[in-house]
Image: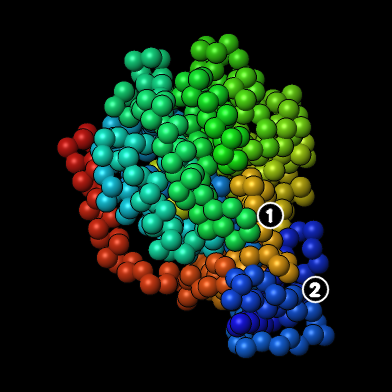
Amino acid sequence: MTRIWLRDPLAIHLGSDADPAAAARGIVVDTTLGTIFELVAHDVRPQADEVFDAGAHVITPGLINTHHHFYQTLTRAWAPVADLPLFGWLVNLYPVWARLTPRALELATTVAMAELLQSGCTTAADHHYLFPTGMDDAIDIQVDVTRRLGMRAMLTRGSMSLGEDDGGLPPQRTVQDPDVILADSERLVKRYHERGEGAKVQIGLAPCSPFSVTTSLMANSAALAERLDVRLHTHLAETLDEEQFCRDRFGMRTVEYLDSVGWLSNRTWLAHGVHFNDDEIAALGAAGTSVAHCPTSNMRLASGIARVVELEDAGVPVGLGVDGSASNDASNMIREVRQALYLQRLRYGTEQVTSARVLDWATVGSAAALGRTDIGRIAVGMQADLAMFRLDGLAFSGSHDPIAALVLCGAERADRVMVGGEWRVRDGEVVCLDVESLIAEHSRAARTLVSGLKE
């Protein structure tokens, strides 16, 4: 058994409901079990086999990303969609994404997860709903990358079954037969889904959205998720266009539609949730349905400002997500914390939206959205998933409160990141990853994907 004492940090965010004095002298990690062994108070000197001087670091729980599309790192800042709202953005990108290959997905997933790691993220949820010809093993590829990088992941088997010929948004060549979708979903859960504390790879079911999936597939996915005891995920209430689509096609608003297909439960977490009314917020809270707030994406596509404080006050677990790297153009969780702070202050003011509160959204709130109770907080017995940020650059010169400075001064990159007691980032670099070679090959794959298409 090896215990590492992360000694005397500059500051520590245990969670906004915890007393930081309980760990004023740091944390002891049991690297054999991968858990937090002890919080070190002022008058305690622990027994440890190794000591890491954390005097220049702010320590937070590992950040948790609740919504992403890893493959979209291949289409960042593509000129034809740079200035379009969601529906136009999607219509132009679907033909590009339909050219995805297994190797391109592997590279895109590696880039997204490595970028997340460098930003202090230890657990990431990905929503992969694109399965063109030759991409049957897309989730298997993502499992391999997750294990290689040593992160935790909730990999959701997404789907699209409502093509443009039947009134949906995606082109026909990007949709699948519902029976194929459900059979593959069950295969993936049985093969890869880990249960219990410390799980590294988990599988969820994630029909893409009301405008790309049939009603029957939504209902059948909910039934399958209940039978297999896994979580459900989809996009909902992201834009007013989506709201109008639901009214026109189903004669319902989005949450009413969600309820009609058996999704209004604590098994579900929703991406975006921008356009909920008061009654819908209350219904989501009563059901325990979670929301992944994606502030940068919502600003990038001009979708609107989610009513996050009201959602949380109604009992809705709120997490943060960076969303796809083509609707955010980055995979940076600590930056997303700052964006959440500023966007939500526009709606609720400064006093309700504090640095500690948005850090909670990115940690314990995100953990709840993914159905996890063993990550997202720093406490004895919790998984040793930790992010450590230095505040010694020009951007922080003259700052006073370390937790506030982490968010307000704009931290961009973690110095150290630990997942389950193992260092996955050292000195700002992902362990055992040739980043230069990765960037070169990933960039070539991105150029190939759009080659011959109109710029």
Gap in angstroms between the C-alphas marked 1 and 2: 23 Å
Q: Which mark is residue 406?
A: none
- The answer to whether any part of residue 112 appears in the image is no
Q: Which residue is identified by label 2?
A: 21
Q: Nearer the viewer, mark 1 or mark 2?
A: 1
> In the rendered view, would you say 350 is above or below 85?
below
Rendering coords of residue 426 (x, y %): 48, 75
Rendering coords of residue 49 (x, y %): 62, 88
Name the element at disc 1: loop
Q: Which residue is identified by label 1?
A: 373
Of residues 269 and 12, the one drawn nearer to the viewer in this rendering: 269
* Residue at 60%, 71% in the rendered image: 34
Rendering coords of residue 365 (x, y %): 67, 50
Name the kind of residue labelled 2 in the image: Ala
N-terminal label among 1 and 2:
2
* Residue at 17%, 37% in the rendered image: 452
